Image (spheres, coloured by chain):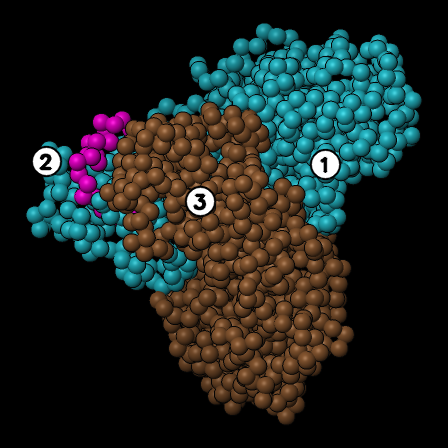
Chain colours: A cyan, B brown
Amino acid sequence: MASSSSLSLSQAILSRSLPLHGSSNNSQIIPPSQITFSGLKSTTTSALRRRVLPSSIAGAAIKSPAIRASAATETLLKTDTSLVDKSVNTIRFLAIDAVEKANSGHPGLPMGCAPMGHILYDEIMRYNPKNPYWFNRDRFVLSAGHGCMLQYALLHLSGYDAVKEEDLKSFRQWGSKTPGHPENFETPGVEVTTGPLGQGFANAVGLALAEKHLAARFNKPDAEIVDHYTYCILGDGCNMEGISQEAASLAGHWGLGKLIAFYDDNHISIDGDTEIAFTEDVGARFEALGWHVIWVKNGNTGYDEIRAAIKEAKAVTDKPTMIKVTTTIGFGSPNKANSYSVHGSALGAKEVEATRQNLGWPYEPFHVPEDVKSHWSRHVPEGAALEAGWNTKFTEYERKYPEESAELKSIITGELPSGWEKALPTYTPESPADATRNLSQTNLNALAKVLPGFLGGSADLASSNMTLMKMFGDFQKNTPEERNIRFGVREHCMGAICNGIALHSPGLIPYCATFFVFTDYMRAAIRISALSESRVIYVMTHDSIGLGEDGPTHQPIEHLASFRAMPNVLMLRPADGNETAGAYRIAILKSKTPSILALSRQKLPQLEGTSIEGTAKGGYIVSDNSSGNKPDVILIGTGSELEIAVKASDELRKEGKAVRVVSFVSWELFDEQSAEYKESVLPAAVTARVSIEAGSTFGWEKIVGSKGKAIGIDRFGASAPAGKIYKEFGITAEAVIAAAKQVS
Amino acid sequence: MASSSSLSLSQAILSRSLPLHGSSNNSQIIPPSQITFSGLKSTTTSALRRRVLPSSIAGAAIKSPAIRASAATETLLKTDTSLVDKSVNTIRFLAIDAVEKANSGHPGLPMGCAPMGHILYDEIMRYNPKNPYWFNRDRFVLSAGHGCMLQYALLHLSGYDAVKEEDLKSFRQWGSKTPGHPENFETPGVEVTTGPLGQGFANAVGLALAEKHLAARFNKPDAEIVDHYTYCILGDGCNMEGISQEAASLAGHWGLGKLIAFYDDNHISIDGDTEIAFTEDVGARFEALGWHVIWVKNGNTGYDEIRAAIKEAKAVTDKPTMIKVTTTIGFGSPNKANSYSVHGSALGAKEVEATRQNLGWPYEPFHVPEDVKSHWSRHVPEGAALEAGWNTKFTEYERKYPEESAELKSIITGELPSGWEKALPTYTPESPADATRNLSQTNLNALAKVLPGFLGGSADLASSNMTLMKMFGDFQKNTPEERNIRFGVREHCMGAICNGIALHSPGLIPYCATFFVFTDYMRAAIRISALSESRVIYVMTHDSIGLGEDGPTHQPIEHLASFRAMPNVLMLRPADGNETAGAYRIAILKSKTPSILALSRQKLPQLEGTSIEGTAKGGYIVSDNSSGNKPDVILIGTGSELEIAVKASDELRKEGKAVRVVSFVSWELFDEQSAEYKESVLPAAVTARVSIEAGSTFGWEKIVGSKGKAIGIDRFGASAPAGKIYKEFGITAEAVIAAAKQVS
């Protein structure tokens, strides 16, 4: 397979020589010689502490005699406090100290969630710290991303290279690996980019979907090659956001049994007690959505409760599980716990000291006690063993199932099958006119045949967006091996779920669809696609007033401009069949960029001069009767209006004008071209330029210049047959001809 | 009060001479001489039909002998079918015929929802067809806006002037009053603009909030002057959208007892049976959200069930009610009912004929049988009487409570109290530096004192957005008279709820707040503010990389450009205290336009030359050492970067340059100015222009021209202290100086 990708299977396969301890069941695989479980369970001390300090008052004054020993040395503490307590407090203080040093950040969540964090990373999850991209790792998503110091502390303790002590010390500083919210593109070990609330939870649904799909496609009775859990911590804020409801409804519908979400139920959000805005019964809601729901009443010190809940969650295989874990935000801070003041600000030197006193923590900032360090150190060899075990299994799988393993490898490495581009259709001017949404479907179906990781669907508009892959059935609870995803009318989570799918494996290429105007419903998810470098293909049909009678609520106007302004988004508006194929080609090739395809509802002719190659340049000449790179006028069109520019050019040429027609299918791609190429298409000396696009003219001055003219629509649309609106709004060849005469 | 507003109280008061039949209870007020209820209840025939045709098979073949009489005349039918059946079928066929004539539209929902529509508009709701803006009317929202022919048919039958027969016949045509989705700005009688799913339901929550708030503020033990219900029909699509979950959670939290939502449970969405993507238990979910839930199992013909459900809903005064009404989409169409094919396309001539046969409808298209017409005709006099009764009550209220009535009148008419602008603060360069988010709070609190209809809040960021009005408490279930609204982390429904508040009464001015970047979560609602001409003030703080450590997930980049491209949005980015006051002033004055204020987290100095008056022009000169309108260079800044432009000008002037500094606080306002004014600020001859803004440069070519230079950020942000990011990204006075030298 010989992939050079850094995220590749080959990296995993390199460690084959390590000892094998893997097995296909779900329990954690640990070399017995290195660890005993006894030390990890709650000791009598911590059990006593639980009785002494019920969670309801835990935040107020935690001063049990066992903990108050301020002069305690490391050795003394070992006998006073269980190692789990100590590890949990290590996590808390790493968060406290990093936020304090940065004088910026959110200490409250890590202090409250440290117990579940410890149990997940130390006792439950299967991962390899030295290869954060090992394919079969358990995925963890901190949907409440502001609490990122929890995750950084856990990655640090587990042995991930990205988060060394110096990284913790440079929390939230320029160029650090520990930014203010978790960012997958900065910190290996972080799966997705979170912070905007609810997104991470929906990403987790996407990760779990990917696992369920791949497991169904590739596992064999004798080889469970895909087999991991997806864990997520979400907070009150995530639960209030509509996107999490959408995602939870789908997760329940799909029966994602290996998705386990921890709801950090701490009753505090930025505005104070959640009582002021959030009094719904979250547990009952999730049950109504088809989830298994467990309530851990003491999330602060109830380690065994948390462990039991996870065990129970794993036993329920046909439903996702939501574990509501009641915690105290800022647990351990005597004066700030259980208040909004600990949510998003450093504790302050005085309160840090008081918290150290209160939790009996005599160490310097950022110190990890030796016994904690030593305890966690096993994860590096264990992780290597886990991966090696899996690699051995995969070698066996390859031998037995060469076809399946080739497909799976492509998904794991992201290497595209050779010759895949040949599957794309091409057209001649004689090919029948068609809507680009239909041409898109031809491409989707062509790609589905050659790209093993291609899957997707629509937000209840499959028959309008034309997004069904005809050779596949629906991904559903009982048919998870299929590849058509039915998202329902849930655009926002659709985007975020696709982000999760794309970031699960480099070769998974999700697409999703709705009307272009409804990108407004999912813009936050699209932005995170762009930021987190997720190759999601957004198939956005009904891309202008050309949709006609549905009227202004359904007619995009400003949407092209709004995405051209967004960093790392490839906004494509193909004009016909060749450009639609070219758009898909480049969307697949740009492996770290989401693409948005704006596609027509209405029929469009196959134009002379369009091409897949031209599309790749973003802007290119489709016809020209000038010479010496000196046309009298340049007509520029995109998408459905390129046809109008061509018609106008025909008229103008009849009148003797030297006219160049340029297709401007993607501004971003044109921007990437050399100055020479740009000059060859839009020579600086030719200021007579007219653009036409059935959308806002905002931004077009850059292309047409101050002496040119941009024809577009700077008002909302209207409800009428499409042709009538085009005419009334002046999106016509006549308008282009008039403008061309005016400027040239 | 002498208001000249077309939506005003005065119009209502004109009809005082009409007879009074009003009372303050919730039952419908009907002059007994004009109507008997007996004819409106289900007759034996329809009861029999229910038995013969259980709803589960209703769509398949509705051919009871009573209905099959194809040769029936109007007189014969009267004896065969109850008047209710006939009225319901009139609604169905008006929808069928209009969609057929347009060959575009959605007949399925009106055919299924005609019974609940009939009962609402004919038996339950209180309204005055001849004054669609009567203040105390019941509000109705069709959240499933694609089914708008239901509403148009009902408005037509009720006697609204906007929907005459010719309007039905021009459904979905250019310039008609009957566009493809309900639009409040086109069709008096339509309360809000719907179509994008879930929006209308959240609007309805806003309408119900407004009623609860105004009732609590203005009603007296002897004068229930505010007293109406809000009804809403939503579909499966609305219920899948996250926004509806957000809104439902808040409606339950607030205990909006006079909100009654009908869930059209027809099991069909565009992709087919809802089983493929929507299997949650909606009723149980709404119960978990604190709603009262009722299930009407036969929504097709079960009129008494629907009536009983509404009665029960009204009896529950401390919770909103969701009535799940199971219907058959396209009821009556023998071959298309209960399938997606009837959702969004005309039935086709053959199926229309079959449906006429099946439902025994011998009439020509668009015909309203005389007895149905006669039956509905009472709503005009009854509506006038209702309003007159209310007017009499209001006259009495005015006499007894002059202060309250003056406030309420201002809310009803939208007339701003004289001198309100004087409340706005002004600043001098000696005033202390401050963040514009703080300066915004000063303005909010000043306006709260002088504008009786001013209310709003934040999506759980009140203490960051600085949006609390200090003289008021929280609007809550038991303190609805207060004006600080706590939306929780629910940006999307926050915007849509504010749309509902703004469209409830012309003098209600809602504001809402979050971080600027999270406009992405609520963009669909903001767009509908703009389209539906809702004066919502969006208080958007943390408006750039200036927020610092939270990093790129929280730092807006493309957002300014994306809203500048959106029609009818006033995007304002004030630089200091005077401009913040100026921004609020213009936001209040633009009564048909939403405004977005982008505000800084970081401190900014009070600049020389800024003013409220200048802000109103969008772009204006804040300092200039040139003469003859011929500066060497023009430096243009917005918001927090205006300070940088000013600093650069100081340096450049020291070097002898003639430098003009222009504040460009709002592009839209500048666009509205005369050509002369624009030339006086940005003379065409001066091409040496440098702009600076900590956001995307997209669109800035229009202002700086092809020879100028736009300094901005065309990548995602970073997590670091703000000053460091500014420096690293080159958003500095040094960069402006260098650019100025380069271009001049």
Instruction: Please name the residue that numbered disc 3 is placed on.
Output: B609
Residue contact at pointers 2 and 3, CB within 8 angstroms: no
Instruction: Tell me where residue A57 appears, x and y as whole percent.
Output: 86, 36
Q: Which element type, helix, strand or loop, lies under badge 1?
A: helix
Looking at numbered disc 1 in the image, what kind of residue is underneath it?
A: Ser
Category of crowding for the residue at label 1, using alpha-carbon neighbours closer than 10 angstroms: few (below 14), some (14–19), many (at least 20): many
Of residues A263 and A541, the one nearer the viewer is A263
Asked if A91 appears above or below B250 in the picture, the reply is above
Residue contact at pointers 3 and 1, CB within 8 angstroms: no
Instruction: Tell me where residue A571 appears, x and y as whole percent.
Output: 38, 39
The residue depicted at 70 percent of the width and 21 percent of the height is A97
Subunit under mark 3 = B
Marks 1, 2 in one chain? yes
Asked if B655 appears above or below B98 in the picture, the reply is above
Looking at numbered disc 3 in the image, what kind of residue is underneath it?
A: Gly
The residue depicted at 80 percent of the width and 32 percent of the height is A335
The residue depicted at 49 percent of the width and 35 percent of the height is A529
Q: Which element type, helix, strand or loop, lies under badge 2?
A: loop
Subunit under mark 2 = A
Asked if B374 appears above or below A484 in the picture, the reply is below
Q: Nearer the viewer, mark 1 or mark 2?
A: 1
Q: Nearer the viewer, mark 3 or mark 1?
A: 3
Instruction: Please name the residue that numbered disc 2 is placed on.
Output: A627
Q: The magenta stretch spans which residues?
A: A671-694
**Quarter where residue B45 is shown:** bottom right
Instruction: Tell me where residue B470 appears, x and y as whole percent.
Output: 68, 52
Looking at numbered disc 2 in the image, what kind of residue is underneath it?
A: Ser
Q: Is residue B185 visible?
A: yes
